[in-house]
Image: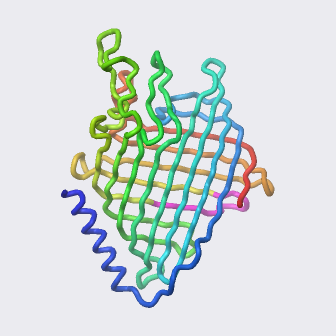
């Protein structure tokens, strides 16, 4: 109850501020939509990577779909982005395995205040993966992720800032985050979770700090999200997103969860592109690393690839 009161009080404040500054703004215009498909071949590697396990640098086939639908009317702006990525690696010892798997939906509403750079609004995000991921260091292999196993759903009202060239946008406010594991939250290899050596097998949900019986954990705290997208030199674009949040009720307020993604795209011609991707995550509740696979760790993934990119 305290969590909901905390966030909805902030939401009401944001709505009240928007109402005070609202004049006749006109009706919404149609969405401006678009997208991009990218297919790459290259080399990638991970370290402490929860969605797919850990792999050293290997040959990689990578596909990425980006969709966007944006609308502006009066002082209002609604921005929607969907980022879907999937990649496979081929290793001489382990064969073909997935190394990247991402479904990331980002939706933000903004209502400009008297200054065109400042706004109040709200954003929501949904992150998960599409197919199962496994820890191949265990025999038999252990399922450690899947569709909505986990999924991270965030809602945050707050204050927003946008630069004049629209390259940088910032959001800061309270949030509620649901960590959901509804797709086979136990995923046990052995009946009753008892291994042949008598030790207990951990349920998949517990790897992410979720009770497998409840299938969801709720966090409340402060949330920061920053987006930057700009052509930094001719034909070279840097797109990055940084999300930082905490849980002020259950955990230490300075114990931060970090979600940081980067893409540097170098356009060679109308279709040929060279991309470098680097992702870094940290969540203290994701405890599947270390010698005993019970500790949190900084998760990293990188990809360097060459291929085709088509906008539509």
Residues 122 and 227: in front is 122
* Residue 232 found in image quarter: bottom right
At horizontal 30% and vertical 15% (from top left) the residue drawn is: 199
Instruction: Residue at the far bottom: name it.
Output: 24
Q: Quadrant of the C terminus?
A: bottom right
* Residue 82 found in image quarter: bottom right
Please determine whether, in this image, residue 133 is positioned above or below residue 258: above
Residue 105: x and y in percent read 50, 55
At horizontal 34% and vertical 30% (from top left) the residue drawn is: 295
Please determine whether, in this image, residue 92 is positioned above or below residue 265: above
Instruction: Residue at the far top: name it.
Output: 197
Residue 182: x and y in percent read 38, 40
Please determine whether, in this image, residue 171 is positioned above or below residue 99: below
| Total tally of numbered discs in the picture | 0
Residue 287: x and y in percent read 35, 33
Residues 46 and 80: in front is 80
Main secondary-structure element of the magenta-colored stretch = strand
At horizontal 47% and vertical 40% (from top left) the residue drawn is: 147
* Residue 190 found in image quarter: top left
Residues 18 and 168: in front is 18
At horizontal 34% and vertical 64% (from top left) the residue drawn is: 173
Please determine whether, in this image, residue 155 is positioned above or below residue 24: above
Instruction: Residue at the far right: name it.
Output: 269
The magenta segment: 226-237
Q: In the image, 155: left or right of 61?
A: left
Q: In the image, 16: left or right of 110?
A: left
Residue 270: x and y in percent read 80, 57
Q: In the image, 50: left or right of 235?
A: left
Q: Is residue 213 magenta?
A: no
């Amino acid at each position: 109850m305290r969590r909901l009161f905390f966030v909805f009080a902030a939401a009401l404040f944001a709505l009240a501020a928007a109402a005070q500054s609202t004049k006749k703004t006109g009706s919404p215009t149609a969405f401006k939509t678009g997208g991009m498909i990218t297919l790459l071949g290259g080399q990638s590697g991970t370290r402490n990577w929860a969605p797919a396990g850990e792999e050293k640098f290997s040959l990689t086939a990578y596909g990425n779909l980006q969709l966007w639908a944006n609308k502006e009317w009066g002082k209002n702006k609604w921005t929607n982005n969907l980022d879907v990525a999937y990649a496979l690696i081929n290793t001489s010892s382990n064969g073909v395995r997935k190394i990247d798997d991402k479904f990331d939906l980002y939706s933000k509403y903004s209502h400009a205040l008297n200054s065109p750079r400042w706004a109040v609004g709200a954003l929501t995000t949904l992150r998960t993966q599409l197919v199962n991921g496994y820890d191949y260091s265990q025999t038999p292999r252990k399922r450690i992720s899947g569709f909505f196993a986990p999924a991270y759903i965030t809602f945050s009202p707050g204050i927003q800032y946008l630069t004049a060239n629209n390259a940088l946008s910032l959001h800061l406010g309270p949030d509620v985050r649901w960590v959901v594991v509804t797709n086979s939250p136990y995923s046990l290899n052995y009946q009753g979770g008892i291994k042949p050596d008598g030790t207990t097998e951990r349920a998949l949900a517990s790897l992410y700090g979720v009770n497998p019986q409840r299938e969801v954990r709720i966090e409340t705290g402060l949330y920061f999200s920053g987006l930057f997208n700009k052509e930094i030199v001719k034909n070279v674009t840097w797109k990055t997103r940084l999300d930082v949040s905490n849980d002020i009720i259950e955990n230490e307020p300075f114990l931060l969860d970090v979600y940081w993604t980067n893409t540097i795209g170098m356009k060679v011609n109308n279709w040929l592109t060279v991309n470098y991707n680097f992702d870094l995550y940290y969540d203290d509740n994701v405890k599947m690393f270390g010698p005993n696979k019970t500790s949190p760790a900084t998760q990293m993934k990188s990809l360097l690839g060459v291929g085709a990119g088509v906008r539509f």
